[in-house]
Every structure is written in C-alpha cells, then in structure tokens.
C-alpha cells in the first residue's frame, strides 16, 4: 500500500492507476506569508477502488481533493506543484480550457453542506440539466435523463421532484440531488467531500449505503474525504491519514483500523463513540502528547516514504 515498506501492496492490483498523485505540494500566500497546506504527498486510486482520506479540519484533505481539477485560487494566492496524472495524463500541465473537460465529466464532486452548494433560485432539475448540457451534448431528452438520475439515487417521484427548489427538500434529499448531479455525467472518479455532514445518523447510513451501491452499479472509483473513522469501515478499500499536510499512515482500511501504527491515527480512532461503553466524556486528541512523541515519528515517516502511498 505504501512505498518503501510502510504496508505491503496487493499483487493483484492493476498495474495502471486511474489517478496517480506524485509529490503534491500546496501553498497559500497572504500578506507576505506562505502557509504550507499540503507537504509533498503521493497516493494512487485504481479503477473501481475507494480511498478514504481521513483527518481533522485543516489537515489538507479538502484542498488535496480540490487541487485535482484546479478548483483552488490561482497564483499568486495558491501555488501547486507536483504531478496529478489521470489515466496517464498530467492535469497540472493542462490549460484552463482542457481542464474544464475533466471537471464534472471525468472527476465529479459532492461538496459539503448541500444546502449551500445548491443554488436556491433554480429548481434541482435545472441545475442537473446544466451539467448534462455542458458535458453530454449528445443527450437529446435532457428531462428524461434528469428523471433517470434522480431515480438512480432513490428519490421518490422523480418526475415531480425535479421541479422542486432546494428549500422544498429535506437535507437527505438535497444530498441525494447533489449525488445525482455528480453522477449525471458518468464520471470515472467521484470525490465525496464530507458527504454526511449535517445529516442525522440514520440519513448518514442511507447516504453511505447509496454511495456503496452506486459504486458497484456504475463501476467507478471514489475518494471519500472525512474526519470520521466511524464511516470508513466496510466502505473504503484503503485509507490514508493526513496530519498537518502530511500522510502519516496508510494501508488497507481494516488493517489500519485493527492495528494503527501512528499516534495520531490511534487518537482519531479513540474519538469514535462506542455503543454500550459508558464514558464520562468523549476522548479528545492530546496535541501536547503528539508534539512530544510525534515529531520524530513524522520525520521517520518522511524518510521511509510514508508520504508516498499506492
């Protein structure tokens, strides 16, 4: 899974990854200062595979995902270096016109907070139609395709719902609309950025089950961005853990959950509430302890290639 012996990769994996990110560095510049958001990470996503990127806010998860299709501010505000290869093509060398062909069509996104991602002044059907017209001009009956997309994500009465405005839908249905919009263009890679944020536990489970079913049905790859290890088990094939812009641990999901090697990974897992276990308060991450024991480990991980993951 990780190069240089962090965890072994499977001999049955396909030789050519769908997505190959190499030595990615992302810097933000403001008021004469440079802030390093992502520090030289590498990872791969293969066809039909699900990769979970886990870490707390500020660890570099979302900016990593957004850098794939250059959704971040342009220079000098943001500087991106490294290579991002999608089916062998280096997206960092594409022109703005060329990269637009990949956004939505080849790599689609489900963003956090569907209530703020959907435009309140347009019907959901109108917003899905925009994506279809832009990336699939061969579709003649756009309305029929919208209804099919809504039905695919299990929205009841899609022939009526596509005329609704976002405020007429529940949070769970809004998220299903976001998924339908992302899948309407038949992407090869779906990036789900905290897809269960602000949803109650029951709806969270429904959304994760839906994504799992759609992955199998459409034979696509998924990158799941999350801070919650609780939704990773049984969903992702492999996981990378990010801390302060670096990959500190990586491997098959169940192996990482069963035997976490890094103190930060163990801290994240210990924060998961467990049914039947009585606690006076939830476990929190002790950053002072991480600073004491972790700096040397982070240096060792970098030397051993922990920032390079297959």
Image (tube, helix red, strand yellow):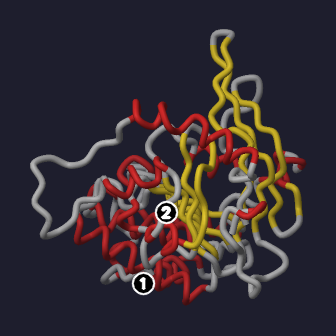
Viewer-proximal residue, 249 or 160? 249
Is residue 130 in sight in this rendering? Answer: no
**Spatial distance from mark 1 to mark 2, Cα to Cα?**
16 Å
- Residue at 59 percent across and 67 percent down: it is 51
Q: Residue furthest top?
A: 32
Circle 1 packing at 10 Å, graded few (<14), some (14-19), many (20+), is: some
Q: Which of marks 1 and 2 is nearer the N terminus?
A: 2
Residue 232 screen position, x and y as percent: 44, 68
- Locate residue 295, reporting x and y percent: 57, 34
Residue contact at pointers 1 and 2, CB within 8 angstroms: no
Q: Nearer the viewer, residue 185 or 224?
A: 224
* Quadrant of the snapshot with the N terminus: bottom right
- Residue where numbered disc 1 is placed: 151
| In front of the other: 163 or 77 | 77
Q: Which of marks 1 and 2 is in front?
A: 1
Q: Residue 29 location, x and y as percent?
A: 68, 21
Q: Specify whether 145 is left or right of 194.
A: right
In which quadrant of the rendered view does residue 158 lie?
A: bottom left
- As helix, strand or loop, the secondary structure at mark 1 comes to helix
Total marks placed: 2
The secondary element bearing badge 2 is classed as helix
Q: Residue 126 carries which label?
A: 2
Q: Residues within 10 Å of mark 2 (few under 14, many from 20)?
A: some
Q: Residue at x 32, y 83 (%)?
A: 157
Q: Is residue 38 above or below residue 144?
A: above
Name the disc covering residue 279, or none: none
Q: Name which residue lies at 48% across and 31% down.
A: 291
């Amino acid at each position: 899974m990780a190069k240089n012996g962090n965890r072994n990769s499977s001999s049955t994996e396909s030789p050519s990854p769908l997505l190959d990110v190499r030595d990615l560095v992302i810097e933000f510049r403001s008021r004469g200062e440079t802030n390093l958001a992502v520090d030289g990470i590498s990872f791969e996503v293969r066809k039909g595979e699900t990769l979970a990127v886990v870490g707390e806010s500020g660890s570099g998860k979302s900016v990593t995902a957004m850098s794939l299709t250059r959704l971040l501010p342009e220079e000098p505000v943001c500087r991106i270096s490294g290579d991002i290869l999608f089916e062998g093509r280096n997206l960092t060398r594409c022109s703005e016109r060329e990269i637009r062909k990949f956004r939505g069509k080849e790599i689609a996104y489900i963003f956090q907070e569907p209530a703020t991602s959907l435009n309140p002044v347009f019907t959901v059907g109108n917003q899905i139609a925009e994506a279809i017209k832009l990336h699939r001009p061969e579709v003649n009956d756009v309305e029929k395709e919208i209804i099919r997309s809504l039905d695919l994500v299990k929205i009841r009465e899609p022939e009526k719902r596509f005329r609704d405005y976002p405020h007429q839908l529940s949070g769970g249905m809004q998220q299903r609309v976001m998924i339908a919009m992302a899948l309407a263009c038949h992407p090869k890679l779906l990036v789900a950025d905290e897809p269960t944020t602000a949803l109650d536990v029951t709806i969270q489970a429904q959304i994760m089950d839906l994504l799992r079913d759609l992955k199998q049905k459409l034979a696509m790859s998924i990158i799941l961005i999350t801070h919650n290890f609780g939704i990773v088990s049984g969903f992702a094939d492999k996981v990378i853990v990010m801390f302060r812009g670096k990959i500190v641990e990586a491997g098959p999901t169940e192996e990482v959950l069963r035997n976490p090697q890094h103190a930060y990974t163990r801290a994240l897992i210990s924060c998961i509430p467990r049914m039947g276990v009585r606690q006076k308060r939830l476990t929190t991450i002790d950053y002072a302890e991480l600073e004491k024991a972790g700096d040397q480990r982070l240096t060792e991980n970098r030397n051993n290639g922990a920032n390079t993951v297959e």
